[in-house]
Image (cartoon, helix red, strand yellow):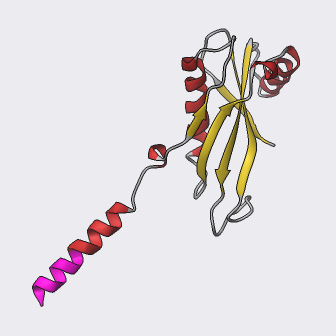
Amino acid sequence: MKRRFLVWLTVFCVSALAGCGDKAEEKVAVDYGSSSLYTKEDMQDAIEQIQAEFAAWDGCELHSISYAGDAECNEANLAWMNAFERADGDTEPYTQCIVFESSFHSPEKEAGAWIADEEYTGWQWWLARSDGGQWKLMTWGY
């Protein structure tokens, strides 16, 4: 009887641990596209900011992140990023901005702000920085 219980307990523990995993370990498809403005390393630094924010979204699964293209990094959008920063009371102007789009799946139940069990596509992530500095996640959404 003890032996059966120990075998059952071992199988249960191994099964439970097999389902554990860190969101950071999930496979996310990344499309860096092509850019004359940013290196792959620049983009990866920005993606890490996005993934850090996304990690706090309980129950959501990030599927893909793709660079939206150099055309989005224009003077009008840079002025918009600087307007966000001034609203926060910071005065150092941003000189670069970058945009990514993502797809993710919302939690199956208790979705909070999300529609439960829904695939979201075209979700935008806007980041800005001063020449070569650290990217700051400014805003996200549709």
> Residue at image x 76%, y 15%?
91
Q: Tell me: 6 left or right of 126.
A: left
Q: Is residue 12 above or below residue 88?
A: below
Total tally of numbered discs in the picture: 0
Q: Quadrant of residue 117?
A: bottom right
Residue 97 found in image quarter: top right
Depth check: 125 or 68 in front?
A: 68
Q: Residue furthest bottom?
A: 1
The outermost residue toward the top is 131
Q: Which residues are magenta?
A: 1-9
Q: Quadrant of the C terminus?
A: top right
Residue occupying the point 76% across, 42% down: 122
Residue 32's x, y, as percent? Answer: 62, 26
Magenta residue check for 120: no
Q: Please name the residue shown 56% across and 24% down the image.
A: 45
The residue positioned 61% from the left and 36% from the top of the image is: 50
Residue 72 lies, in percent from the top left, at: 80, 23
Left or right: residue 37 versus residue 39 is right
Q: Is residue 86 left or right of residue 29?
A: right
x%, y% of residue 115?
Answer: 74, 62
Quarter residue 46 falls in: top right
> Residue 123, position in %: x, y?
74, 42
Q: Main secondary structure of the magenta part?
A: helix
What is the quadrant of the N terminus in the image? Answer: bottom left
Q: Can you say whether 16 is above or below 97 in the image? A: below
Using the image, determine if residue 23 lies above or below residue 100: below
Residue 50 higher or lower than 89, as above or below: below
